[in-house]
Amino acid sequence: MKQVAELAGVHVSTVSRALNPETRSVVVPESVARVMKAASKLGYRLDPVAASLRTGRSKLIGILVPQIATSVFTPILAGATERLAAHGYFAIVAYVGTDTETQLEFAHGLIARRVDGLILAMATRRDPLASFCIERGVPTVLVNRAEDAARLSAVVSDELLGAQLAVDHLVELGHKKIGHIAGPADHSTGFLRRKGFVQALASHGLDGNGAPCEVATTYTREQGAQATRRLLSAHPEVTAIVAANDSLALGVYDALRESGLQCPRYLSVVGHNDMPLVDMVEPPLTTIRIGHQEMGRQAADLVRQAIEVREQPVRKIVLPPELVIRGSTAAPRKGR
């Protein structure tokens, strides 16, 4: 650092501030440029391990997601890592599946490696991993899903409003016989979207509790197709389906295709999430768009605040969804 200071013609403390993203703004831009150029020429980088020994912070945040096969979590990760990097933090991403023991093992390993905090994207409504993090005093934030008991800060979408928007759209088209492919009931997304679906039907004078509904055990196309076969077999009168996420909606497409039925001529379909490329399927999917990237940014802010100022109050940030109308919805079919 002294060599960098000599080459740049500045004080050592200026080098320290210029190379630190959190303090760089207090240094004159011209000095920052000279320091960066000198550091590059000398091949000098800050030693994060040495810094962590001095400050007690590693500047590492663990982000745990259930899977990467679905593109729902990609924008969340993009938003979180972008915001963390802007404040000098780096992310370690772990794909932990749905097995509780595996999740606990990953969390324990990250804590042992001195991460400053955790962002969890796979919480259940009563989550043992959340309990684990609370017991160990690790700053932790939930994203995309939340617990029933607000023990940790969370950033989620307004699931009830999302379901309301989907049902409103179908009712405006003339649908009255609307079914629902629900997500896993132990996830806040599955539970609340189903609750919102029932409430939305009731707001239009329709029987929400008696509406056809099949529950998928996971958010996959295969589960969506299986649930759709069951629903249409028991309720062939249904003219529209609200799916709890886009993967389930694509499963609805699969089940219709198998039976030689057309969407939306025979059945209108609404998804949830607006995953990348759902505008490229045939027909393009009408869905509820969620601001996943902003969700990631907000989660990064919350975990950083929890690290830097302990005893933060629990906060729940609810982001508004929006309806995106495409080609998978139309007026209901005539007759059977």
Image (tube, helix red, strand yellow):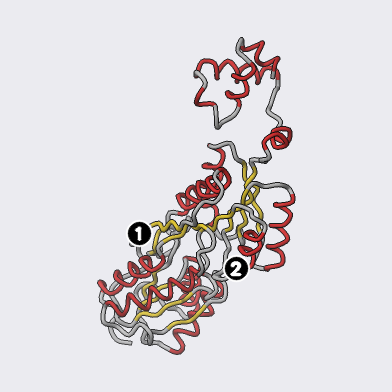
Splitting the image into 4 quarters, where does residue 103 fall? bottom right
- For label 1, the residue is 322
Which kind of residue does numbered mark 2 sit on?
Asp
Q: Is residue 277 left or right of residue 55?
A: left
**Location of residue 320 in the rendering, given as x and y in whole percent from the top left corner:** 37, 58
Which residue is located at x 41 percent, y 84 percent?
212
Residue 34: percent from left, percent from top = 58, 15
Residue 83 drawn at (x, y percent): 52, 42
In front here: 218 or 259?
Answer: 218
The mark that comes first in sequence, 1 or 2, is: 2
> In the picture, which quadrant includes the C terminus?
bottom left
Q: Residue at x 67, y 57 (%)?
A: 136
Taking 37 as reference, is 326 above or below it?
below
Q: Nearer the viewer, residue 303 or 121?
A: 303
Q: Which mark is residue 127?
A: 2
Q: Badge 2 local density, few (<14 within 10 Å), some, or many (20+)?
A: some
Look at discs 1 and 2 and give the one toward the viewer. Answer: 2
How many discs mark residues in the rendered view?
Answer: 2
